[in-house]
Amino acid sequence: MPIIFTEVRLSFWQYLLLSLRFTLQTRPLFLVPLLATAGIWAVFILQLMDDQPLGGQWKNDPTGSIFSLVMMGLPFLIVWSIWQQYQRSAFLQEAVTYTLDDNGVQVTAPSFHTTLDWEAIVQLRHYGNWLLLQTSAQTAFFLDMRRVQPPATPADVLGFFR
């Protein structure tokens, strides 16, 4: 019996959170610059709360100040980069229907239709209501388990992959 997911749509915020979760799981060292950035933001906020002049730090340590500014901008650069990825992919913005059966995955959207053999799926990741079917280290199909059509259930979907 095929398992069908209809009208799967991924908002930018869902994509952002899933992308960050995936990145932190597959590349945990990515957390190091994020923690450093959080520390720099904390120092900046504490300086503002203490009414310390920020110009004094710039005069005393211009190199450190430039580094701090770059690191403070890191979260914005990450979000902007993920926004660019999201905007470039029509697939992420369309309503997609997935059909899982013994032969593979059929992916249907208004602008394309493709069938993937199970050998093309290199990794399966489960994050909350989402399944990511990876076809490469940087490419995945996003299945929303809330969109699985009866009589199948999310438990059936997870059982299908066991």
Image (tube, grey):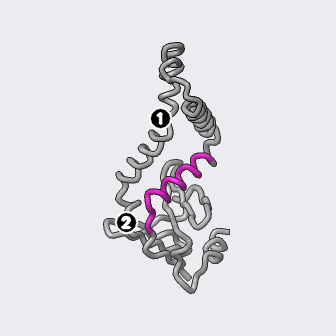
Q: Secondary structure at mark 1?
A: helix
- Amino acid type of disc 1? Gly
Query: Which percent across, then down, holds residue 145?
Result: 56, 71
- Which amino acid is tagged 2? Glu
Q: Main secondary structure of the magenta part?
A: helix
Circle 2 — which element?
loop
What's the residue at 66%, 73% (across, down)? 159
Q: Is residue 60 above or below residue 7?
A: above
**Where residue 40 sits: x, y (%)?**
58, 31
Which residue is at 61% across, 42% downward? 27
- Percent position (x, y) of residue 74? 49, 36
Residue 70 visible within the image: yes
According to the picture, the residue beneath numbered tag 1 turns out to be: 73
Query: Residue 75, relative to residue 156: is it above or below?
Result: above
Q: Kindly identify the residue that appears in the image at 52 percent across and 31 percent down.
A: 71
Residue 43 circle label = none
In the rendered view, tell whether residue 59 sits above or below residue 37: above
Classed neighbour count for the residue bearing mark 1: other residues with Cα under 10 Å, few (<14), some (14–19), many (≥20): few
